[in-house]
Image (spheres, rainbow, N blue to C red):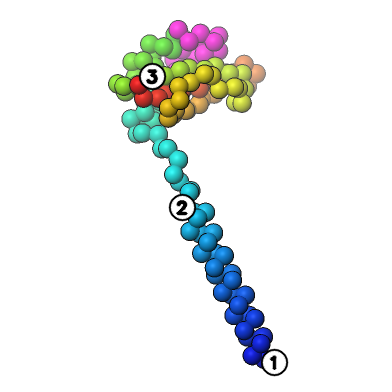
Amino acid sequence: MVKRGYLRTLEAVIAIVIVLIFIFSFGISNIGTGEVTPKNVKDAQKFIFKTVLSNETLRDGVLNDDPSLLDPVVSRNLPLGYNYKIQFCKSADCPIPLLPSETIYIDTVFVGEENNFRVLKLFVWEE
């Protein structure tokens, strides 16, 4: 009788080990396969946002939904071979604009004050 208890316990442990091996082999292999923003694009996005936040004229352009003020700053500071699209939103969950079917690198910053702000989204992709 005691031997049957050991066998059932051994069967349960083996079943748990098999399930864990299955989960780890198939589940974890898919984690982290997403695209990572290239360093030069990430640095350019940070610099552009820092420039916008430190320049009152550019901030006013964002708050007034005027992309013509930002276009020269963005086009001058993005790495060669990249295109971009600027989007202004009144909330963080605004709809995504029409973009090409390529890998898109997105970065976001909030511009303004508590009651008067815009979400500035910068979409960047390779030409």
In whole angstroms, how far apart are the C-alphas of marks 2 and 1? 43 Å
**Residue that mark 3 sits on:** 83
Seen in the picture, residue 81 relative to 65 is either above or below; the reply is: below
Q: Evaluate whether residue 107 shows in this view.
A: yes
Q: Residue furthest left?
A: 80
Residue assigned mark 1: 1
Residue 108 falls left or right of residue 7 = left
Relative to residue 24, is residue 71 drawn left or right?
Answer: left
Q: Earlier in the sequence, mark 1 or mark 3?
A: 1
Crowding around mark 2 (Cα neighbors within 10 Å: few <14, some 14 to 19, many 20+) is: few
Secondary element at image label 2:
helix
Q: Is residue 21 above or below residue 14?
A: above
- The answer to whether the residue labelled 1 contacts the one labelled 3, judged by CB atoms less than 8 Å apart, is no
Marks 1 and 3, Cα distance to the nearest angstrom?
Answer: 74 Å
In the picture of the structure, the residue carrying the numbered disc 2 is: 29
In depth, the one of 125 and 7 nearer the eye is 7
Marks 2/3 in contact by CB < 8 Å: the verdict is no
Provide residue 44's location: percent of width, then percent of height: 36, 25
Identify the element where label 3 is drawn: strand
Residue at 40% over, 25% down: 125
Secondary structure type for disc 1: loop
Marks 2 and 3, how far apart at CA: 32 Å
Extent of the magenta region: 52-68
